[in-house]
Amino acid sequence: METIVMEHIRLPKVENVRLIDTVTSRRASVGTLYLTATHTIFVENETEILTETWVLHSLVFSVEKQASTTTGCPLLVRCKNFQVLQFVIPQERDCHDVHVSLLHLSRPEHYEELYCFSYNANSDREDRRKAWDFINLKAEYSRMGLPNHLWKLTPANHHYKVSDTYPADLYVPKSATPPVIMGSSKFRSRGRFPTLSYYYKENHVTICRSSQPLSGFSARCLEDEQMLEAIVRSNPRSDFMYVVDTRPKLNAMANRAAGKGYENEDNYSNIKFHFVGIENIHVMRNSLQKMLEVSEAHFPSMSYFLEGLESSGWLKHIKAVVDAGVFITKAIAEEGISVLVHCSDGWDRTAQVCSVASVLLDPYYRTLKGLMVLIERDWVSFGHKFSHRNNHLNGDPKEVSPVIDQFLECVWQLSEQFPCAFEYNERFLITIHHHVYSCQYGNFIGNNQKERTELGLQEKTHSLWTYLWKNRTDYINPLYRPDHSQTQGVLRPLTAPYCFKFWGALYNRFDRGIHPRQSVMEYLMAIREETQQLEEQLASHEMDRRAEDVEAIWASPPSNSSVGLANTPGDYSGLGGFLKSPYQQKEPENSLLILPWPQELRKPTDPDLSTNGDDQESGIAGLSCLSPPNEESAKDPDSDETAYSAA
Amino acid sequence: MEFSEHIKTANVEDVVLRRPFYQPTKGTLCVTGHHLIFSNRGGDSARPFLLLLRNIDAIEKSVENLPSVSSGTITLKCKDLCVLQLDIPGMEECLNIASSIESLSSLETVSEMYPFFYRPPFLSLQDQWGLSSTEQHYAQMKEIHDGWRVSQVNRDYSVSPSYPPAVIVPHSIDDETLVKAARFRQGGRFPVLCYYHRETGTVIMRSSQPLSGANRKRCREDELLLQAVIDGSELGYIIDTRSSQQAQQARMTGGGFESKSCYRGWKRLHRQLEKGKVLQESLIKLVEACGDQSHSVDRWLSKLENSKWLSHVQTALSTAGLVAECVERDGHSVLVHGSEGTDTSLLVSSLAQLILDPDSRTLAGFLGLLEREWVQAGHPFQQRCAHSAYSHVRLRHEAPVFVLLLDCVWQLARQFPLAMGFSEPLLLRLAKEVYASDYGTFLCNSDQERCVTGVKERTHCLFQSLLRANERQHYSNPLYERTELAIWPSIQPPSLQWTCAFSPIQWPFDMC
C-alpha cells in the first residue's frame, strides 16, 4: 500500500517555500516543504528553535492553486479541522507538482490507504485487540437495565440479514415476535425497523429509533403497526407514544411521492405525531461553508460578522437539534411517554436528536466514558455513515455533511450553560472532532458495523477511546462537580436564541488571536496538576520516612512520573494532524497569564509580507481597522490623520 | 411634600405576583413612598419582595370590570430590565395602585429620593463619603510629585461646574493659566490628568473640546498647558472621539478641535464613538431583540446586528486599545476628548486604564476608578440614567454610556478571566444600581450638585458598601491572579460575545 501512496508523490521536497500566517497576513516564514506518505511537513529555516508544521493528508479538505505572482505561486490548503495554510512556492512547476500530489494523497480511493492502517502498526496485536474492548455496548445496555421483563435482545439482525446498516445486537419489546420484526423491517427504509436507543430506568420509558416507513400515500403494514403497539405496551404507565419525525414537514411529504413518508396517525392506534423540522445534510453542508467564510474573514466589521452568521443559518440549525432533544427529554422525563424518532434513513438527524436527548436525560453521558459510549452506540453502531459524511475517501461530495460536528457543538452549547455538569472539557469535544476526520484511529472508518467488521478494523487499527482514556487528565473539566444538584438528573437548558453562541474555539481553532487570552480551564487544570504533584511528593516523602524507619526498600516514585500524564499543550497538538516540533511544545510557565502582542489591534496594512513591520507607528495606524481611513480627513488640512497613515 | 398624597390605596390583599424563574405567588401588596412591598401571607420564612419605585421604567395596566369579575393586571417593566406582573383583584384598587406607581416613580426631586432615607445598620453617616479624594489619590502617587500638582482652582466650582474641586495638572501651570484655559474649553473642562504610566512616564489626560469656533480662535494658555504635558518629549496624541467631519461641524456651533499649527507636537486622531440618542436607541433595540419571544435565531442575529450595540462595544474597546498603545508601546502622552468631555471621553480613558493599570483591576481599584473617572469627573448620571430601555417617555438626555462601559469591562474580563479582581455579579449589580439605588453614589450630575443637595452628608456611598467584607467576598473573582502586564483585548467580532444580561429573564442570573 505504501508503494501506491509513494507513487503519488511527484516531488518529495521543495525548498524556499514561504508559509504565510493567514491570520495576520503580515508574517511569513521561509522553509522546506516535504511530502511524505502520510503528512505534509513544513520545516522552518533559520530559527533558533526548530519549528515544524505537520498536516495529515486525511485532514486536507481542499488544495487550491492560485494565480502566480512575482514572488511565487500560492497554494492554499484548507483542512477539515479548520486549519488554513497558505504556502508560496517559488517555481510554478513545483507548485503544480505539489498540488497534484496533495490532491491524490488527500483523496485516497481505498480504505486500506487510510492512515489508521499504518499508524503505529507494529504494536502488540493482542494489546491492540484488547484495547477495543474498553467500550462495550453490551455493558452499556445492561447499565441501562436491559434486557429485562419488558425489553429483550433480538438475534434478528445477526449476520446483518435484516438490515445491513444496523448493528447485529438490537433490543426490541418483549412482545415483538420475529414475524413482526421482519414485517416491520420490510416496511422501513433500508430495513431499519424501530428498535431501542435509550432506556430511561427511572420510569421504564424509552427512546426508540428507526428509518421512515414506506407508507407512500396510503400503504399500511400490519406488522409495523404491531411493532409500534408493542413499544407503547412496553411502557405500562402510558397508553400512547410520540412519533417524532425530525424532518421539516414538507420534506417528509415529498418523500411520500417516492413511496416513503411518515406514519399516518389514523393507521397507528395510540401515536401522536410530531415534526421538528431539522434540515437535511445538503442544507447543513452549505450552512457550514457559509459560516466558515464568515469566520475566516480578516478583520470583518461587526455587522459583516453578525449578518454572515445569521445568513449561514448555522446557529438556527444547532438550536433546532437542541430543541428536538429538549422535546424528547420532556416527553420521557416529565410526561413519561416513550418516543420513536426517525428521519429518512435514520442515521443522521435521528442520531443527533437521540444522542442530544440522552445527554440531557442521563448524567452518565456527561462523563468522559459516557460520551464515548454514547457515540459508539447512537452513531457508530447504528450506522452513521462516517466515511461518507466526513469525506474519508474520494467519494461523492454530496454525501459530505457536518452531522456529528453538529452533535458535538450541541454538547458544547449545553456545557456552556451548565459549566459544572460535564466531566469532559471543550478540548475533549474538539479532539473527538479532530479524529472523526483524521483517520488515525479505526473507530470512525467505514459506514456501518458490517463494513467495519469486514475491514478487520479491530485487528488492524487502534481505538481512539483508549487513547483518550489514557490521556484523560487533559480532558477533565476542572469545574465538574458530580455532587452538584445541577449535575444530577435531567438538564433543562434555556433555548432562547441568545443562548446559542459562536464556537470560536473550534471554528477558529488555529486563529489564536481571537481566543480568550487567559483560559480558566487551563489555569485550573494547572493548579490541579500542581496540587496532585505536591500530594504525591508528600506521600512519597512520608513513605520514605516510613521506609527509613523500617529499613525497607521503598523506591520513591520518580518525581516526574505524574508529569507523564500531565497536561502539556504539546500532547494536545501532537496528535498527528497538526503539531509543532517538541522543542516548541512547552510554553513558558507563565504563558497562562500573558499575551505577548496586541496584534489583532493592528491592521495588516504592510504589503511586504516578509518583513515583520514591527515599527510601532504602523501598529497604531492599524487600529483604524474599524473605521477605514477617514476620507473626510483629506478635506481637513489640519488633521494629522493623513500624514500619519502615510508615515 | 408628603408621599401619602400620591398613595390612594396603600394595601391590597390577594395580589398575584408573577416574575421570571419564580412560581406565581399570592400575597399582600403594599405601596410606600419609595417601594412596592409584596409579602407572602403564608407566613413562610421568605422575605418580602421589595421593589424600588425608582426602578420602574414603564407601567402597563389592563382592567376588567364585569358584574362577576372586577380585576386588573399591572405589568411593571423595570430599569434593570426585569419584567414583573401583578394581578390585582378589584378594578379600582388596580387603577389606584397604578397611578400611585406612575407618580411616585417619576418624582424628580433629588432630596426626596430613597437614598436620603436609607439607613442601614452597617454604615454610618459620619464616615467619609466616597473612597478617596483627588488629594488622597495624588498623595499615593509619589512618582508624579515632581511634574504634577493638585490645583484647587475649581474649589468653588466657578471654573468648571462639572469638575471636582481639585484636579491634577502639570506643575509648571499656575491657576491663573488654568482659569484662562478653562474659558477656552466647553464647560470649563480644561485638560486634567487621569492616568500616569510609570514605565514610560507618559500620561492620559482628558478634557472637553476647545472652543475654537468658526474663526479658529486660539488660546495661548490652553496651548501652554498641553505643551507642558509633553514637555521634553516631541510628540503627544489627541484622540478625538468624534469623526473629523463631526469635529469640523462642531466649529459652526462654537466648538472645535486643536489645530496642528497651534498645538505643536500634538497629533490628532479621530475615532467616532456614538453617544446620546444613538446609544440609547441602540440599547432599546438590543433589549427588544433579547425579549423577542418568537425564538428564532435568525431574527435574533439580525436584530442584534441592527441594534449596533456590539459595534459600539467594539469601537469603544478599540479606541481604548489605541490610547493604551500610544502610552505603553509608543511612549507618548494622550489627551482624550469628544465634545462635552463627560461621556465617551470617560469611557475611553477608563477602559484604557483598565488595559494598562493592574491597580485598577482589583475590586477596590476598579471602584476607585469609577469614582474618579465617572462620579467625580462629572458624568451626568441623573440625566443619562433617568430612563432605561422600556420607557415611552420622550428621550431627553438619556444614554447608557455607563452600561456600555460595563459591557466593555465584561468583554475584557471574558478575555482575561484571571486578570480582574472582581466578578461578573459586580458588573450586573452596578448596572442595576446606576438606574435605581439605595445609595447616593449615582445621584445628581456632578460633584457640585451632590454638595448642594447634601448627598455626601445624608446618603451612603455604594462603593464603600461594596467593599465591606461579606460583599467583597461575593464580588471578588476567585480566580484572580494579578498580572502587571497590559491586557490587550481582541476586538475581532468572534472575540466579542453577546451577553444575556440584556434579556428580561436573564438579568439577575449569570448563566451565560
Image: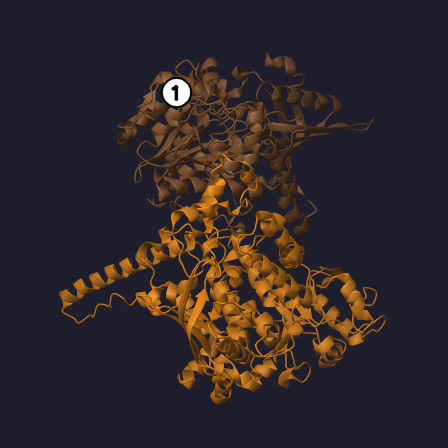
Chain colours: A orange, B brown
Q: In this picture, is A17 found above or below B325?
A: below
Q: In this picture, is A96 found above or below B511?
A: below
The answer to whether residue A79 shows anywhere in this view is yes
A268 sits to left or right of A367: right
Q: In this picture, is B381 found above or below A305?
A: above
Label 1: few (<14), some (14–19) or many (≥20) C-alpha neighbours in 10 Å: few
Q: In this picture, is A377 found above or below B162?
A: below
Residue closer to the observer: B427 or A505 = A505
* Amino acid, disc 1: Ser
Residue closer to the observer: A465 or B403 = B403
Residue B200 horizontal/vertical position (percent): 31, 39
How many numbered discs, if any?
A: 1
- Residue drawn 85% across and 70% down? A217
Quarter of the view holding residue B462: top left
Residue B4 horizontal/vertical position (percent): 62, 14
Residue closer to the observer: A611 or A542 = A611
- Residue drawn 31% across and 59% down? A532
B288 sits to left or right of A510: right
- Residue drawn 65% across and 64% down? A286
Q: Residue furthest top?
A: B1
The answer to whether residue A206 shows anywhere in this view is no
For disc 1, the marked residue is: B124
Classify mark 1: helix, strand or loop.
loop
The chain identifier of the residue carrying mark 1 reads B
Residue B416 horizontal/vertical position (percent): 42, 47
Quarter of the view holding residue B39: top right
Residue A345 horizontal/vertical position (percent): 70, 72
Residue closer to the observer: A76 or B409 = A76
